[in-house]
Amino acid sequence: MSWTYTTLKSAIQDYTQNTESTFVADLATIITQAEQRIIKSVELPNFRKNVTGSLTSGNQYLSAPSDYLYPYSLAVLDSDSNYSYLLNTDVSFIREAYPVAATTGTPKHYAQFDDDTFIIGPTPSSGFTVELHYFYIPESISASADGTSWLGTNAPEVLLYASLCEAYTFMKGEPDMIGQYEQSFQRNLARLGVFANIAEGLDYYRRSKD
C-alpha cells in the first residue's frame, strides 16, 4: 500500500467520516502538519542532503538552504578540495572567541544564528567554498508535482495515522479515538525508527541495550 495526495485525502475523509467543506479545505494543512511531526520524530537517512556554497570575505554570516532543518557538518574546502570541518558551537561562544567581527581568518567554528542563517568564526578572510551536510524538510505530498512523496510510498501507515491524529485534533474529536490513533501512530513510528537504524548501518539491538 502507498498513498498519493488524492488517495490519502480520501482515506482521511473515510476514516473520520467527515466531508464538511472547511475540513476538506484544510486537509493539505493537516497532512503537512502530520509530515512535519514524523520528520521531527525520527531521523531518516533519506532526508540528508549536501550542498556547496560560498562564504564572502568580511561577512561572518552564511545563509541556510530553504529546506534546512538542522546540520550534520559544515566544511571549508581549500584549492585542492581538502575538507576542514568546522566545530559546531553556539552564538555566545563565537561572540566571545571572536569579539571583533572585522578580525578575519580561516573559519574554524559555526553556530545557528537564526532559522535562516549561520554565524562563522573567525570572519572569513576570503570567499571560501563550503559544503553543508544537513537534514532537510522534504516536499509535502500535498505540494509535489505528481502527488507522491517518500513517506507516502515508504511509510504509508505512519503518514496515515499521523494525519488522523492531526485530523481528529482539528475536529476536536473524542479523546478515546485520538488516543487510539496516537497509539497506532507511535507503534508504526517505532517501526520506522528501526528501519532508519538499519538503513544507517547501525546495530540496533546493541544500541537499544546501551
Image (tube, helix red, strand yellow):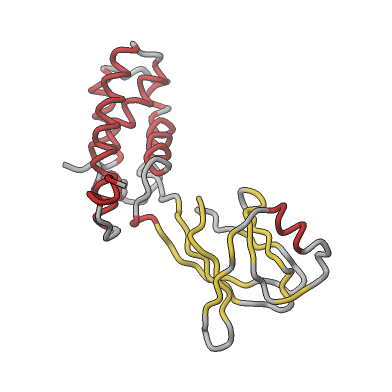
Q: Position of residue 92 (x, y in %)?
A: 72, 52
Residue drawn at the location 81% of the way across and 71% of the way down: 103
Q: Is residue 152 left or right of residue 43?
A: left
Tell me, yes or no, if residue 103 can be seen here.
yes
Residue drawn at the location 81% of the way across and 61% of the way down: 99
Residue drawn at the location 71% of the way across and 73% of the way down: 124
Residue 164 sits in which quadrant? top left
Number of marks in picture: 0
Q: Relative to 181, is 105 above or below?
A: below
Residue 117 sits in which quadrant? bottom right
Closer to the camera in the image, 1 or 193 = 193
Closer to the camera in the image, 20 or 72 = 72
Q: Relative to 125, is 209 above or below?
A: above
Q: Position of residue 106 (x, y in %)?
A: 68, 76
Q: Is residue 192 left or right of residue 34?
A: left
Q: Is residue 7 left or right of residue 97?
A: left
Q: Position of residue 83 (x, y in %)?
A: 52, 78
Residue 25 sits in which quadrant? top left
Given the current orientation, which residue lies at the most extreme front position?
210
